[in-house]
Image (tube, helix red, strand yellow):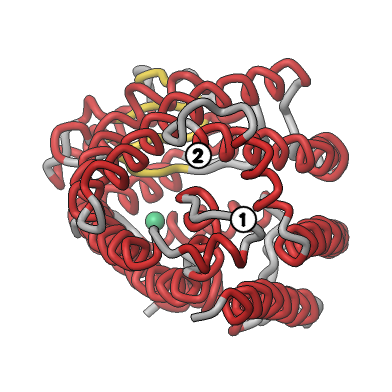
Amino acid sequence: MTEQTILTLLLGIIIFDFVLERTLTYLNRKSSKQPIPEELEGIYDEEKYQNSQAYQAEVSKFGLITSSFSFVLLVLAIYNGWFGMLDQWIRTFSPLSLISPLIFFGILFIASDLLNMPFSIYRTFMIEAKYGFNKMTAKTFILDKIKGYLLTIIFGGLLLGILIYFVNAIGSDFWMYFWAVMAAFVLFANLFYTSLILPLFNKLTPLEEGELLSSIKAYCEKVNFPLKNIFILDGSKRSSKGNAFFSGLGRKKKVVLFDTLIEKHTTEELTAVFAHEVGHFKKKHILFGTVFSIALMGFMLFLFSRMAYNAEVSWAMGGQTSALHLNLLAFGILYSPISTILGIIGNVISRKNEFEADRYAKDTYDSAPLIAGLRKMSADHLSNLTPHPAFVFVHYSHPPLKERLRALNN
Ligand SMILES: [Zn+2]
């Protein structure tokens, strides 16, 4: 492919992505204004319903502004060859070509973070705060930033460093070796996320003696799940939105319940949510998800190895000579249609898994408290109760509430 064709392709994909995303969001916003279906009546009172409409309108308007901003910036950068210019400039002082990609991505990371910061501050401290969701102080926001930067430097820098080394030392077969490194990294992250990474941001405490623990204890005995793996997370440090999740593999598995969830739900509802999370483990969803993502990574790295050394790609990005980092960035854009399709497949599987976990909770515990809990959670999050099917198909990792309740009632 010529430089010109690649440039056209890059711009075409960016424009297509933007138009698709905007169309889906527009449809979804329109769909959210329909009357609430019968099955979901009573979730919102009139005031809460108006509140949810106002919240969704504000979030989608804000999304239009931020995505338009990034879109225009990216198109300008690609069209004018700004990434190539950055590469030229780095070459004037970077002593080793091995370090240039690290400097290149370091600068891009800082620049994009600074450009996005006003938006994320506005979203957290204006929109989320206005609807009573934000519990984050400025101090937590700044500390989160610093920790996020450190983690990116350590893990991002390390992985990128290994990739650069392999690309230069091994040649086009580098993808197999780097795949092994990435697979090890994903497994490591999965196993140690709740014990090493999460505690940097949140406090995890074991569930204390009481009504909830007794109820969960009885359930655990019934389904043979080790009780020592249940933790409470201080989600209230950042947001009033309650949540629960399952993490880890094998003996490292953990169920994490947010304190904000515990605050608002009854013991039965919480046990049902817990049963749903145990369902994910028993049905091996986490294991399959991990294997699936490692397989996709291999596919992606193989594709990247086909264009890692291509000079035309670097020229299309505005570079003068072939540069790994320019090609890697271009690859990220060229790969995005594939990643959109894979994302949709992943979401289809994930929604199926959610139904399975709900079913597991229903069979081993009870459906009524799960229904009550899900309804309450939707109301607390001011969720869109009538999302557009196309938006659900592309973006929803969980089925819409209406479908979940229908399945639970059957
Ligand atoms: Zn789930």
Residue drawn at 75 percent across, 75 percent down: 22
Relative to 69, 368 lies left or right: left
* Quarter of the image where the C terminus is located: bottom left
**Residue 341 at x, y = what percent?**
45, 77
Which one is closest to the eye, mark 1 or mark 2? 1
Q: Secondary structure at mark 1?
A: loop
Is the CB of the residue bearing disc 2 within 8 angstroms of ligand 1?
A: no
Image disc number at residue 249? none
Residue type, label 2: Pro
Residue drawn at 44 percent across, 34 percent down: 156
**Residue 93 at x, y = what percent?**
62, 27
Around disc 2, counting alpha carbons within 10 Å, would you say few (fewer than 14), some (14 to 19), or many (20 or more)? many
Q: Secondary structure at mark 2?
A: helix
Residue type, label 1: Gly
Is the CB of the residue bearing disc 1 within 8 angstroms of ligand 1?
A: no
Residue drawn at 56 percent across, 28 percent down: 94
Q: How many marks?
A: 2
Q: Which residue is mark 2?
A: 101
Q: Which residue is mark 1?
A: 319
Question: Taking 242 as reference, is 202 above or below it?
Answer: above
Q: Residue furthest left?
A: 224
346 or 81: nearer the eye? 81
**Residue 406 at x, y = what percent?**
46, 78
**Residue 4 at x, y = what percent?**
63, 78
Residue drawn at 71 percent across, 20 percent down: 142
Q: Quadrant of residue 32?
A: bottom right
Question: Taking 20 as reference, is 64 above or below it?
Answer: above
